[in-house]
Image: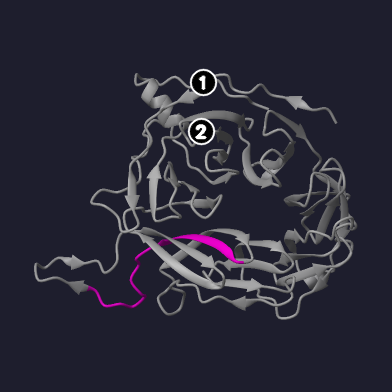
Amino acid sequence: MSVTTYPRIGACVAFILLGTAFGAQGQSSPLEQPRLTDPTLRREYVDLRFSSPASGYVFTDSEILRTSDAGRSWQLLFTASPAQVVGERFFINPTTAWIYTSRRGALPAFLFRTVDGFATVEQMGLEFQRHDKMRTGFISNVFFLDAEHGWASGGSGHLAVTADGGRTWVGHLIPRLLGEPGRVVMFPPAPGQSPTEGIAKTDIGMIRTTDGGATWQAIPNASRITMRDWQCVDRSFCMQMDVLNQITTSTDGGISWHPEPAPIDKPPADDGRDQVYSLQVQSPTRAYVFGVDTHLPPRGQTEVIGANGQRVTPRYPRTSFLLTYEAGKWKRTNYPNIPQLGVGQFVDDSNGWAASSNNAIFRTTDGGQTWATVPDYYRQIAALTPTEPPFVFPTPTP
């Protein structure tokens, strides 16, 4: 399949002034930047991926932006075609990644691969031959161990495997009693060996394979609770968080899972006022969880009226927190003046980034004790072009 080359955006927006730093205990004014009001400039950030303290990507649901100087300047690398959204992003290193675009969950969908940091992208395959009455299946939820070997869910009881980077896929039918398969995680093989062992979440539990995904078996006593995210370093350590804000770990390749004593308010004790939504597992001894304290009162709590006759809101407004897992111990850092940090990632023990749907990007250089706001690509455009309507640089459209 041919490689389609899209030119790197020539206009690189530079803006020297970085945001204001705020401590973990907060200041008198909120850390978040005001939302841009112009709809052509306002963006909701959904993901990010950094390879060093200064270099990385941030994602909207249709765009990929990159900085190589810690946010002083940004380049717009990729824009999905009209009506398409970037639903999935999977990196194996700073320059090799796959992005999955779809028409907001409907066909047509496209899988692209880059091996040069989005200087070029190659359209890959989506279809595979099903093993039931339907002839063709379509993959989603991709996972790759290297530039060639990948796995994906195929819908309707199928998982799919590729050995050519996603150009072609081979489907495998999963017995109905094992449930509908979703996201797959395969474990790195021994040097010189082919990947064989992995696990997958289904709608009724978990399954595992020992032959590279050709056959699957149920994992006994696996939780049926829907997972928000899960990551594995290798078969020796996996961590997952579910929609009930519970965090569990496995040290035996996902065969058994054990609850973690993370400092989170979980239902039913407090109606789950804490919500965890971003997980990063760096190693078997270090992980990060980003979340929000909704400050909602427990269900059934009696309304309190103050001496002035005004209703007292017990816990309000929303604030952010960071959970740090280090060698089996948890630490919680609260940020009273950050309503939403968003999706976060640390590149080392000190340097981290976060990007939120509230149109804000954050950076820390002290392990999350303080965060600074970083003007994004569109705020820099707004600062350079204050007249209405603002000028937006042309974007590449695959």
- Crowd around label 2: few <14 · some 14–19 · many ≥20 (10 Å): few
SS for dot 1: loop
| Placement of 130 over or under 52, stated as above or below | below
Please provide percent x and percent y for residue 296. 35, 67
Q: Kindly state the secondary structure of the residue where label 2 is placed.
A: loop
The answer to which of 139 and 372 lies nearer the viewer is 372
**Residue type at mark 2?**
Asp
Q: Residue at x 55, y 20 (%)?
A: 394
Residue that lies at the very extreme toward the left in this rendered image: 308
In the image, residue 388 above or below residue 276 = above
Q: Residue at x 71, y 47 (%)?
A: 92
Left or right of 186 on screen, residue 232: left
Which contiguous range is marked in magenta?
Answer: 285-303
Does residue 358 sit above or below 272 in this rendering?
A: above
Q: How many callouts does the rendering have?
A: 2
Q: Along the line of sight, which residue is nearer the eye, 112 or 296?
A: 112
**Residue plotted at (53% across, 46% down):** 46
Q: Which mark is residue 12?
A: none
Horizontal side of 350 relative to 153 (left or right) equals left
Q: Position of residue 246 (x, y in %)?
A: 54, 72
Q: Which mark is residue 69?
A: 2
Q: Is residue 81 left or right of residue 316?
A: right
For residue 221, side relative to residue 209 (left or right): left
Q: What is the quadrant of the C terminus in the image?
A: top right
Height in image: 239 above or below 56?
below
In the rendered image, residue 4, in percent from the top left (x then y), is placed at: 76, 26
Of callouts 2 and 1, which one flags the residue occurring earlier in the amino acid sequence?
2
The residue to which callout 1 is attached is: 393
Magenta residue check for 208: no
Q: Quadrant of the N terminus?
A: top right
Callout 1 environment at 10 Å: few (<14), some (14 to 19), or many (20+)?
some
Mark 2 and mark 1: span between their CA atoms? 20 Å
